Amino acid sequence: MRYRIPQRAAALVLASLGLLLSACDRQSEGGQMLLSPVQSSFKNTDVTGLEYAKDFSLPDFNGKTRTLADFKGKAVVVFFGYTQCPDVCPTTMVEMANVMKQLGPQADKVQVIFVTVDPERDTPELLSKYVPAFDERFIGLVGDKAATEKVAKDFKVFFQKVPGKEPGSYTMDHTAGSYVFDPQGRIRLFIRHGQGTEPIVHDLKQLLS
């Protein structure tokens, strides 16, 4: 697994963030994020006031359309990935499962959402087995190609199909971070991949306090 910061990084009042990309077989680049220059005690990137990534509308693996309003009162962590991802996705999900354990009773006020960027292979049935395997409270969302592209664009999440060595096989390059909304439904944080559980637990407790 190799990563690099995208060459194109936008800035808002002298603040900028390069999104880490998951290149499951190779390097890629894409996406950009505007940041609010807010001074805070968060350990992850504070994106309070971000002008995008405000909502989503996609079916879950039970066929029920979900939006951010469904989880009002909870901190919501949104991660974009796919079930056949060999490393970034499962490690992120294991990390979030460990975060939930460390939060103890407060975990009931956190909702982790896995949005697939591979609706061609990630059927609702497959997601219903994959996502809750990490924590039964986790939810998977899957839309058709157009709906997936719309939500990814709204969140400025990059994803791209990468042909494999065998005919018809492929992997997906994709943004490897997560967004976090506070219990009032406001975008607050961007979590870079691979930081470990402690910064996430710290920030979620702060949002829930």
Image (cartoon, rainbow, N blue to C red):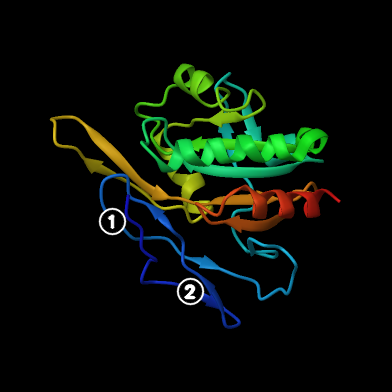
Q: In the rendered view, does 184 fall on the left or right side of 156? A: right
Q: Is residue 147 something one can see in this rendering?
A: no
Q: Secondary structure at mark 2?
A: loop
Q: In the rendered view, does 32 fall on the left or right side of 56? A: left
Q: In the rendered view, does 36 fall on the left or right side of 131? A: right
Residue 180: x and y in percent read: 65, 50
Q: Is residue 20 something one can see in this rendering?
A: yes
Pointer 1 residue? 27
Q: How far apart in space, not on screen, are marks 2 and 1 (Cα)?
A: 20 Å
Residue 62: x and y in percent read: 58, 18
Please give the label number shown on residue 73: none
Q: Is residue 110 above or below residue 16?
A: above
Q: Residue at x 52, y 65 (%)?
A: 33
Q: Is residue 177 above or below residue 4?
A: above
Which of these two is toward me, 63 or 104? 104
Contact between labelled residues 1 and 2, with CB atoms less than 8 Å apart: no
Q: Residue at x 66, y 51 (%)?
A: 198
Please give the label number shown on residue 10: 2
Q: Amino acid at mark 1?
A: Gln
Which of these two is toward me, 33 or 99? 99
